[in-house]
Image (cartoon, helix red, strand yellow):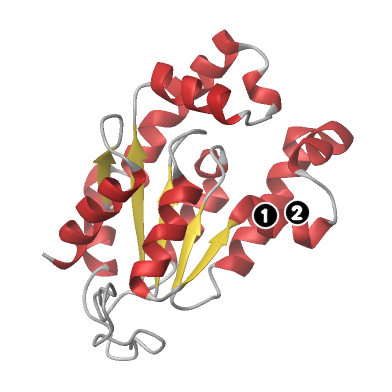
Amino acid sequence: MTSTESEAETQNKIQPNAESHTKNMPTNEPGLTPAPAHLRRLVLTGFMGAGKSTVGRLLAARLNWQFLDLDAHLEARTGATIPQLFERHGEAHFRRLESTALASALGRDHTVLALGGGTPEELTNRLLLEQTPATFTIFLDAPFPTLFDRCMLQDIARPVLSDPAAAQLRFQKRHPLYRRLANLTIETADHTPEQTVEVLLISLTG
């Protein structure tokens, strides 16, 4: 897909959809922000440590939407943790399971969905995200050292973090994919999760 085609698809995706509506989203309660009426799901992407789950929960609360973490959704569907799936089946099989879980997650309305860090690597997943109507993807960006330090502080256990040099190579490989897939990119290195949500909402509704 060329960058021109990607931009054209992005414009098509964010046009108002007459079938979309904002149920479960009262606008007269304090602290709630109405989402654009033509959107039914917001997808957060980025490398490990970007804050996708933290920001996603805060964002869902502000919109009065559901929050869904794709890793947690996959673990619930398989009855195994992400590290266990990697260990038992290898990454290739894990990615196939992840694609199936993503298709399931994208069937939900009024949902903020946090992707796994490697989800956009698979062409199948990128096509699912680009071709699902009323879906808007947001890239939470930060430099690799910032992301790695966050993971260490949060004690996030992932096989890809066991070798920092290899993890940085993964980040460098994925970064262009995150940017190309996103309808919106937000720099998070100097923002708290709450500040990131405010910037995101202003960008969406302003």
In the figure, residue 30 lies in which quadrant? bottom left
Q: Residue at x 49, y 21 (%)?
A: 148
- Residue furthest to the right: 88
Q: Residue at x 32, y 40 (%)?
A: 192
Q: Please name whichever residue, 49 or 184, is drawn nearer the observer in this view of the structure.
A: 49
Task: Give the percent coordinates (x, y) of residue 51.
Answer: 44, 41
Q: What element carries label 1?
A: helix
- Determine whether 51 is above or below 206 in the image: above
Identify residue type, mark 2. Glu
- Determine whether 76 is above or below 2 in the image: below
Left or right of residue 204, residue 49 in this image:
right
In the figure, residue 21 lies in which quadrant? bottom left
Q: Quadrant of the C terminus?
A: bottom left
Q: Which residue is drawn at 39% across and 39% down?
A: 178
- Residue furthest to the left: 206
Label 1 Cα neighbours within 10 Å, binned few <14 / some 14-19 / many ≥20: some
Task: Give the percent coordinates (x, y) of residue 57.
Answer: 46, 59
Identify residue type, mark 1. Ala
Residue 125 is marked as: none
- Determine whether 18 is above or below 118 in the image: below
Query: How far separated are the C-alphas under marks 2 and 1?
Result: 5 Å
In the figure, residue 26 lies in which quadrant? bottom left
Q: Please name whichever residue, 64 or 95, is drawn nearer the observer in this view of the structure.
A: 64
- Residue furthest to the front: 30
- Circle count: 2
Task: Give the percent coordinates (x, y) of residue 1.
Answer: 36, 46
Residue under pointer 1: 72
Left or right of residue 121, residue 100 in this image:
right
Q: What element carries label 2?
A: helix
Tag 2 near tag 1, CB within 8 Å: yes
Residue 75 is marked as: 2
